[in-house]
């Protein structure tokens, strides 16, 4: 019986389906990969849409930098408001990178790209702390979520923002940074490393 359950679980992990979703007045397709992505069926953090709307009214075509893409929640909200502004996301979690690229493909988002690394003040390979192997809720900062049981140890590459901005293509400064994995440490690294890139928005710990 346990063998059947294990086999079924592995099969589900490789299963990719898409479901229709609505974000504001916009309609998209959201992938569900082995059960991951179900949260995108609901418009979580509706306040974020209003924040993005205000940011776009201040600098409507500057480009958008998303630190900690996760499952594309901010990307979906951005595209519900503006389908043309260039978007560049940084995301070190392999599962989230896979999911976000599938989200981009399904919805034919243009000028939208993911760089599969985290940000730091120097180039390195860091430990990555997640609750389980396929968790999308992870951080490069140990103990960021008290009580979280860390699963298999993983490692991810991190780079300074200065080294990555030249690869941004059409996403040019000034940029908006709405969130970042890693709490205060991530805030310090971002602001210390991005002095030449205009004013950054509030950085929310993830």
Image (cartoon, rainbow, N blue to C red):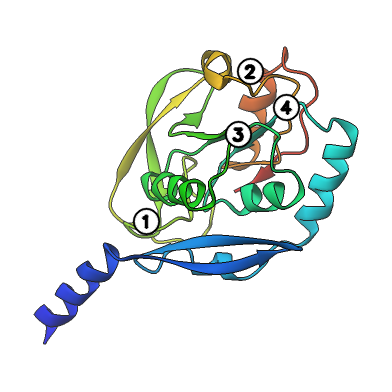
The number of numbered discs placed on residues in the rendered structure image is 4
Question: Within 10 Å of the Cα at label 3, are there few (<14), some (14-19), or many (20+) other Cα atoms?
Answer: many
**Residue plotted at (69% across, 43% down):** 83
Which of the numbered marks, if any, corresponds to residue 186?
A: 3
Q: Position of residue 117 (x, y in %)?
A: 44, 31
Q: Mark 1 or mark 3, which is nearer the start of the sequence?
A: 1
Quadrant for the N terminus in the image: bottom left
Q: Mark 3 or mark 2, which is nearer the start of the sequence?
A: 3
Label 4 or label 2, whichever lies nearer to me, is 4
Distance of mark 1 from mark 4, alpha carbons?
33 Å
**Residue plotted at (65% across, 38% down):** 184
Q: Position of residue 95 (x, y in %)?
A: 38, 50
**Which residue is identified by label 1?**
150
Question: Within 10 Å of the Cα at label 1, are there few (<14), some (14-19), or many (20+) other Cα atoms?
Answer: some
Distance of mark 2 from mark 1, alpha carbons?
29 Å
Q: Residue furthest front?
A: 108
Q: Position of residue 113 (x, y in %)?
A: 52, 34
Where disc 4 sits, the SS reads: loop
**Which residue is identified by label 4?**
175
Q: Mark 4 or mark 1, which is nearer the start of the sequence?
A: 1
**Which residue is identified by label 2?**
193
**Relative to residue 187, is residue 75 depicted above or below?**
below
Distance of mark 3 from mark 4, alpha carbons?
17 Å
**Residue plotted at (58% across, 37% down):** 110
Label 3 or label 4, whichever lies nearer to me, is 4
Q: Mark 2 or mark 4, which is nearer the start of the sequence?
A: 4
**Relative to residue 130, is residue 25 depicted above or below?**
below
């Amino acid at each position: 019986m346990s063998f059947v359950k294990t086999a079924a679980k592995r099969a589900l992990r490789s299963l990719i389906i898409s479901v229709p979703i609505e974000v504001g007045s916009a309609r998209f397709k959201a992938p569900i990969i082995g059960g991951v992505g179900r949260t995108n069926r609901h418009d979580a953090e509706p306040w974020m849409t209003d924040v993005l709307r205000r940011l776009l009214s201040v600098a409507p075509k500057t480009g958008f930098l998303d630190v900690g893409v996760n499952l594309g929640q901010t990307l979906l909200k951005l595209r519900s408001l503006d389908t043309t502004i260039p978007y560049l996301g940084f995301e070190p979690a392999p599962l989230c990178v896979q999911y976000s690229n599938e989200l981009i493909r399904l919805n034919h988002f243009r000028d939208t790209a993911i760089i599969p690394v985290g940000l730091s003040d120097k180039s390195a390979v860091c430990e990555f702390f997640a609750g389980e192997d396929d968790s999308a809720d992870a951080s490069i900062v140990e103990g960021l979520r008290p009580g979280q049981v860390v699963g298999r140890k993983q490692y991810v590459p991190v780079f300074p923002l200065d080294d990555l901005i030249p690869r941004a293509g059409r996403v040019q400064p000034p940029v908006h940074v709405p969130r970042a994995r890693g709490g205060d440490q991530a805030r310090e690294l971002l602001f210390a490393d991005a002095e030449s890139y205009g004013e950054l928005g509030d950085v929310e710990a993830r």
